[in-house]
Amino acid sequence: MRTERVSGDGQAERRDVRVVVGAAIVAGGRVLACARSAPPEVAGRWEFPGGKVEPGESETAALVRECAEELAVRVEIGDRVGRDVRMAHGRSVLRVYAARLVGGDQPQALEHAALRWLSADELDTVEWLPADVPIVAALRPLLGAPRSPGPGD
């Protein structure tokens, strides 16, 4: 993904935006949440598993690889969940996909401090990383939850 911005002298600068993918692994009406173990400034906050898409790698291939590396599971990737979420001062974009476990695999916390399966009613019981918050809202319908009332409802 490329973006352009105008420099001080009016010239357009091109730069690549790094794509980060996440997996909303759903099973039995619950989604898998993972607690970060590092770096210290985000340790203990929750996210969807995933990582950076490497050059020449598709987004879905990156997710399959990341889930195997982080959780020791095989996954089947489904549709996108939510919108692109800008991260790292616009240098990265997060794209989350629905996923399901295959082959009876059970996630293991190889790179995370903890794992939790959350129902729609439990999504707000953990402190999500800022980039994952919009995805949590988009995920509720996939878990069969009614939308939370907002201001003016």
Image (cartoon, helix red, strand yellow):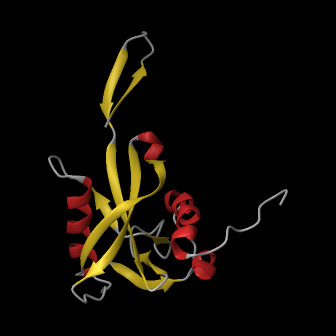
On-image quarter of the C terminus: bottom right
Depicted 153 relative to depicted 123: above or below: above
> What residue is rendered at 20% in x and 60% in y?
61
> What residue is rendered at 32% in x and 84% in y?
109
Q: Which of the two residues, 37 or 52, is positioned nearer the viewer here?
A: 52
> What residue is rendered at 39% in x and 76% in y?
37
Give the quadrant of residue 125.
bottom right
> What residue is rendered at 85% in x and 56% in y?
152
Q: Position of residue 34 (x, y in %)?
A: 42, 77
Query: Furthest-right residue in view?
Result: 152
Q: Position of residue 28 (x, y in %)?
A: 45, 86
Q: Position of residue 93 (x, y in %)?
A: 40, 47
On-image quarter of the N terminus: top left
Q: Position of residue 118 (x, y in %)?
A: 52, 82
Give the quadrant of residue 8.
top left
Give the quadrant of residue 65.
bottom left
Count of numbered circles in the view: 0
Depicted 86 relative to depicted 107: above or below: above
